[in-house]
Amino acid sequence: MDFKQARDAFEAYLDEYDGEDEKIKLKIVHTYGVVKSAREIGKRMHLNEEDQQLAELIALLHDIGRFEQLRLYNSFSPDTMDHAAFGAQLLFEGENPMIRRFLPDPEFDEIIHTAIARHSDFKLEGITDERILFHAKMIRDADKLDNCRVKLQESVEAMIGVPQEKAREGLISPKVWESCLKKEAVLSPDRVTSVDYWVSYVAQYYDLNFKETWQIMKEEDYISRIIWRLDYKEKDTLEKMKILDQQMNDYMENILC
């Protein structure tokens, strides 16, 4: 397995797309951010070289479906396609599958296919092979970890479609708050208000899999920094965000103790 060869092939693939398009740029930066996150998590786990390179390769390719999604629909909306399943299809279908550009040896195809196809599932279920499950969990953690950077650096309007001043308005919907109290990620259909979307970006971290990921979350103070990026207008929302901040940080401490 040669990550440099895979990266060169990925760069050649990106030549097919408009590198000046802001949405394309966003996904390229995110891709390499997820590679960096996978490298850092794996380093803390003391992964063997093969699994480390495999984790980084999956990270490199995990969002490959996004580029064609943008070309076809100019949108990241899940209403247009399941980008994860589409990415796996793009890589593995046909007589001369694209995956061979990145990795000549088919030995790891099942691991890569499953990890990419399932990386955006609400929950991971039904994977019985331990190594496949490990890499499916790894890419989900690495993806969420780089999304912390995204939530702190990108414009709020680009993420949820309204200006930051509007995003801080409104009440948290009952189903969204119920998920938070249960220490669960939020189902997309349960989000109604703009602030629901921001709450869901925080609650997704209840789905992190590895202690090493939580170590980085704590070191960077990501939970509180994301929560308090917005200045909540409604008193009820403000009080609930204080509760969520404390609850999630306590949850993290219990994992790390």
Image: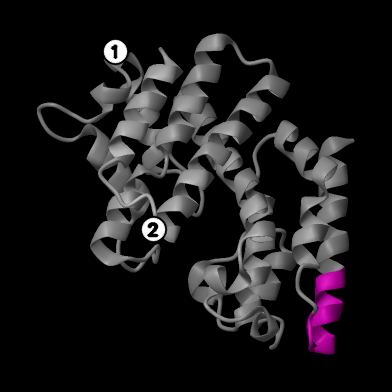
In the structure shown, which secondary structural element does the residue marked by tag 1 occupy? loop
| Disc 2 crowd, CA 10 A, few/some/many (<14, 14-19, 20+) | few
Q: Nearer the observer, disc 1 or disc 2?
A: 2
Q: Nearer the viewer, residue 66 or 153?
A: 153
**Which residue is pictured at 45% across the width and 33% down the height?**
60
Mark linked to residue 105: 1
As drawn, 100 above or below 37:
above
**Which residue is pictured at 68% across the width and 15% down the height?**
46
| Image: magenta residue range | 232-242
In the structure shown, which secondary structural element does the residue marked by tag 2 occupy? loop
Q: Nearer the viewer, residue 25 or 197?
A: 25
| Majority secondary structure of magenta residues | helix
Residue under numbered circle 2: 21
24 sits to left or right of 204: left
Residue type at mark 1 is Asp
71 sits to left or right of 218: left
